[in-house]
Image (cartoon, helix red, strand yellow):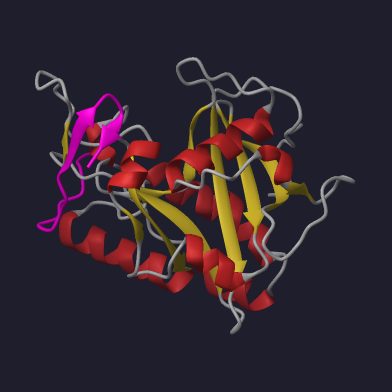
Amino acid sequence: MAQSKIIKVFEKGPHANTSSVIYTRDPDGVFRFALCGKLFAKSRKPLDSNKANTGPAGTDLKYAGKWGFFGGKKNKGRRSPKHDLEASVNEIRDEANIPSLKSTSVSVSWMARSPCGPQTLNLLKACEINPSTAGFIYFIQDSNYFFSLFPQWPNTRGGADIVTSSCGEIDLVSSFSMEQLSSLQQTEIAGDNNNFVISYCANSLNKIVIPFISEKSDEFKRKWANGIQVVSDTAPRQCNLQSLYTEIKPGVYV
């Protein structure tokens, strides 16, 4: 993490994409990370029946049904954010369906900015993940509030409302301990040679997030220095239990 290139969050940098990690620490001291789940293949019925993609919109099919951090292209349609922080927050707001979330209410830990209350989204780190992606790590102190947004796995929040707010890409959000992420990933790899956590997100977790959290906890560092397993994404994740979301008017799903 120390060698990562720092991002100037109030400028619009050269990176085309953002990737945002949000975490809390529960009363037992366990770090929990918020992730979003992409729609499974064949789970979306668009208005245009001729559209070939009936999985997560704007997404390569091999990522369908998998979980990852909040993020995507900075510029979408007519939306052009003023700076990288706004681009990051836009993606969190849409993919987690938090309509009230704005970049102006985010606390930036290294700047004299908005005060950081227990329910504030507090930006702790902004760095380059790769030449095309700017990475952000946020912390929410109030774990109860965090869990109201991102329930603890296997509980989830979402459905058609998040499918709508994410423009047909995401349907669920949840939060995971490292033990859960590691176990779910191991099970998926052992069963189908596939990922539960999208490969590029698992790599960011291993190379960016784990070193950052390890600076805050020796126990975490000792347990997770080697990260979680990851294989190449080649096929969508399979599931027998999946919802079907129908587009009833442009951009609105039920």
Residue 212 % position (x, y) = 67, 57
Q: Quadrant of the C terminus?
A: top left
> Vertically, is 191 above or below 91?
below
Residue 3 or residue 199, whichever sits in front: 199
Residue 123 % position (x, y) = 71, 49
Side of 6 relative to 113 (left or right): left
Magenta span: 234-254
* Residue 247 among those drawn in magenta: yes
- Say if residue 234 shows up in the picture: yes
Side of 77 relative to 113 (left or right): left
Residue shown at the point (13%, 39%) measured from the top left: 42
Side of 107 relative to 140 (left or right): right
Q: Give the image quarter of residue 189.
A: bottom left
Residue shown at the point (48%, 44%) measured from the top left: 70
Residue lying furthest front: 249
Residue lying furthest right: 112
Number of numbered discs = 0
Residue lying furthest top: 78
> Vertically, is 47 above or below 253?
above
* Residue 95 among those drawn in magenta: no
> Vertically, is 25 above or below 202?
below
- Say if residue 225 shows up in the picture: no
Residue shown at the point (29%, 40%) measured from the top left: 63
Provide the major secondary structure of the magenta segment. loop
Residue 32 or residue 214, whichever sits in front: 32
